[in-house]
């Protein structure tokens, strides 16, 4: 059995690489074109595009791996069948169920990985992507230019002496009615960044002055944060647990959760269908295996999408039904014959 496992692993991984490289490349190209279209609305550098691509990387893997695994399983068993190697395995009293059982271990590992990936990493990546877009939009709206008056950051009037990349130098802020006082701030440099409370301006090495009732107060600071409260409610980062907890109240978030689970478990719950398509008699050429493979995947993903949209969490009941139908067909069409 150890030799069989090693043999199947070698055949399976060679098929996986053959499918993964082109599919991953196509998916990456599609996502990258989508990212490039953002430059029509926002000014992004090449490195910022790469940064956004990294944020979309979990999505690319999530939608690529189930397709690659199923297609590679079908291709591997189909190749072994029509090169008479599957016949040799059956002649050694190795049943189709044993082959499916071994692939089931790989599918279980992949499905577990995808569950962790989709329910923990993908929410964080999506939030980072959204937060970066919010930050760039707010920055574009702010559009601070050196040596120009009239810029505003929240309730503050803002003036900067010069700018080097993302660092502002010789920063001046003025607010004529902050907490009932006139306020004036001078800082050597500052930079913008995004936080859960909104867009923030971090000031370094400066002095703050407040004037009230003929009294002038001065404080020296090394660091000071000033928030644009108008951007505070645009976006909030949440941890994965709180992110999915919203699904109890939000139908859209419940749809995402259900769809992620269904897609993650597709490799494990669809192995019998891969066996039906891949295992065959080498004396009779089977045409249309590739089309049938695409059809099975389209059927599963289409039904999963429709059920998740209509019934959210109850759509998970589709998984045992899909598995049961596959097991029944596999037993009748494959296991009884081989």
Image (cartoon, helix red, strand yellow):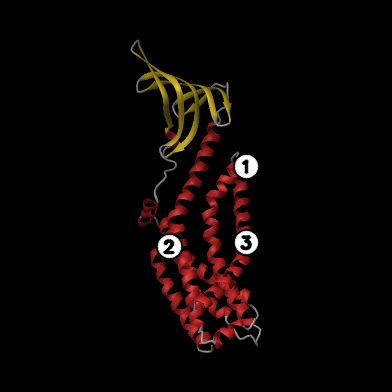
Question: As drawn, is 99 to the left or to the right of 221?
Answer: right
Q: Nearer the N terminus, badge 3 or badge 1?
A: 3
Residue depicted at x 65% and y 81%: 83
Disc 2 secondary structure class: helix
Residue beneath label 1, please? 46
How dense is the environment of label 3, judged by Cα within 10 Å: few (below 14), some, or many (20 and up)? few
Query: As displayed, is residue 130 above or below residue 70?
Result: above
Query: As displayed, is residue 63 above or below residue 126?
Result: below
Query: As displayed, is residue 182 above or below residue 114?
Result: above
Towards the viewer: 216 or 47: 47
Q: Nearer the N terminus, badge 2 or badge 3?
A: 3
Tell me where residue 76 appears, x and y as whole percent: 59, 74
Residue beneath label 3, please? 21
Tell me where residue 267 appears, x and y as whole percent: 50, 69
Towards the viewer: 309 or 91: 91
Tell me where residue 230 appears, x and y as whole percent: 44, 34
Towards the viewer: 171 or 102: 102
Residue beneath label 2, please? 258
Image quarter (top left, top right, bottom left or bottom right) of the C terminus:
bottom right
Question: As drawn, is 226 to the left or to the right of 58?
Answer: left
Question: As drawn, is 179 to the left or to the right of 192?
Answer: left
Q: Nearer the N terminus, badge 2 or badge 1?
A: 1
């Amino acid at each position: 059995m150890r030799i069989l496992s090693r043999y199947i692993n070698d055949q399976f991984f060679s098929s996986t690489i053959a499918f993964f490289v082109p599919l991953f490349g196509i998916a990456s190209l599609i996502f990258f074109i989508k990212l490039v279209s953002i430059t029509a609305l926002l000014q992004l550098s090449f490195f910022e595009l790469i940064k956004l691509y990294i944020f979309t990387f979990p999505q690319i893997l999530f939608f690529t791996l189930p397709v690659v695994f199923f297609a590679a399983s079908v291709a591997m068993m189909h190749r072994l069948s029509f090169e008479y190697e599957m016949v040799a395995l059956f002649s050694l009293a190795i049943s189709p169920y044993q082959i499916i059982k071994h692939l089931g271990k790989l599918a279980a590992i992949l499905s577990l990985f995808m569950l962790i990936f989709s329910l923990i990493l993908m929410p964080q990546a999506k939030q980072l992507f959204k937060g970066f877009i919010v930050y760039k939009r707010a920055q574009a709206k702010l559009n601070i230019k050196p040596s120009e008056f009239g810029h505003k950051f929240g309730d503050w009037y803002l003036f900067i002496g010069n700018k080097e990349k993302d660092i502002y130098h010789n920063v001046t802020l003025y607010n004529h009615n902050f907490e009932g006082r006139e306020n004036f701030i001078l800082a050597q440099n500052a930079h913008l960044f995004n936080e859960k409370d909104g867009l923030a301006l971090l000031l370094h090495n400066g002095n703050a002055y407040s004037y009230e009732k003929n009294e002038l107060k001065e404080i020296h600071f090394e660091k000071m944060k000033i928030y644009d409260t108008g951007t505070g409610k645009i976006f909030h980062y949440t941890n994965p647990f709180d992110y999915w907890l919203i699904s109890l109240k939000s139908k859209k978030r419940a749809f995402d959760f259900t769809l992620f689970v269904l897609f993650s478990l597709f490799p494990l719950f669809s192995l019998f269908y891969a066996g039906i398509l891949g295992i065959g008699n080498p004396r009779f050429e089977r045409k249309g295996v590739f089309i049938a493979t695409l059809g099975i995947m389209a059927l599963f993903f289409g039904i999963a999408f429709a059920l998740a949209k209509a019934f959210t969490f109850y759509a998970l009941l589709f998984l045992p039904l899909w598995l049961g139908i596959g097991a029944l067909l596999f037993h009748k069409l494959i296991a009884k014959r081989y």
